Amino acid sequence: MTQQTELHKALEAIDRANRQDPNTEEVDGETLPREYAYSLHMTRWLFELDPAPSERMQIACRAQHIERWTRPRADYPEGRKAYYQWRQACGRFHGERAAEIMAACGYGPEECAKVATILTKRELRSDADTQLLEDVACMVFLERYFAEFYQQKADYDREKWLRIVRRTWAKMSPTGHEAALKLAAGMPAHLLELLQEALSETGQD
């Protein structure tokens, strides 16, 4: 079994899992299972930020939200503390599922463990692969879900939205910032204004 075959099998297995999502999303006029659509957005942005990504990054990005619908936010209490507990639990779950799939496709324990660690994001800032995953995830959020999230959370005040934008920005690398600023030019006016205000107050506009 060649490495390329291992990668192909792993990506196919992740796609099969994510196609089971009962929730849907419209992409270019086509209705797709939501987490499958998300995984395709992740892969597309990975190649935008790194034209020659490693196999582990292709797998990690494809598995970023693998089977997330089985771990709903509603299972946790309201509040920021519970939100982060949910996020951490999701990261561990995604890492375990990705490692399990990789092992079944022929990857060795070290590579499986590395991808599992990337997906927990425990080494954000200190690990280049983890940082790249975070940059990709932030780009997908800004491009595909920021506007939807803004509409869903209409009760948030301006200061809360500024904090959300600043926290997202703070998690990104300079490469991610550059890509985000290019993307921002095509955002709806109210979102572009929010981004500009958030960044102007941090001296990063």
Image (cartoon, rainbow, N blue to C red):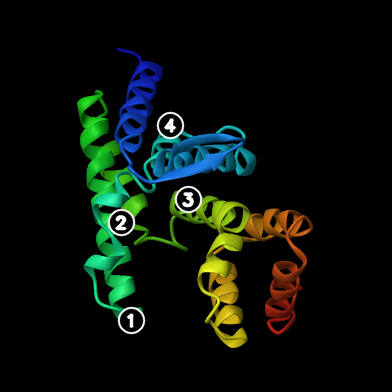
Disc 4 to disc 1, C-alpha distance: 37 Å
Q: Are marks 3 and 2 in contact (CB under 8 Å)?
A: no
Name which of mark 2 and mark 4 comes first in the sequence: 4
Disc 3 to disc 2, C-alpha distance: 12 Å
Disc number for residue 55: 4
Name which of mark 2 and mark 1 comes first in the sequence: 1
**The image quarter in which residue 26 lies:** top right
Q: Are marks 2 and 1 in contact (CB under 8 Å)?
A: no
Disc number for residue 24: none
Disc number for residue 79: 1
Q: Nearer the viewer, mark 2 or mark 1?
A: 1
Tell me the quarter of the image containing the N terminus. top left
Q: Are marks 2 and 4 in contact (CB under 8 Å)?
A: no
Disc number for residue 133: 3
**Residue at x-position 62% and y-position 36%:** 28
Q: Position of residue 101 (x, y in %)?
A: 24, 33
Side of 96 relative to 162 (left or right): left
Disc 2 to disc 4, C-alpha distance: 19 Å
**Is residue 59 positioned above or below 71 on the image?**
above
**Residue at x-position 52% and y-position 81%:** 155
Kind of residue at badge 1:
Gly
Q: Label 4's element?
A: helix
Kind of residue at badge 2:
Gly
Q: Label 2's element?
A: helix
Side of 53 relative to 34 (left or right): right
Disc 2 to disc 1, C-alpha distance: 19 Å
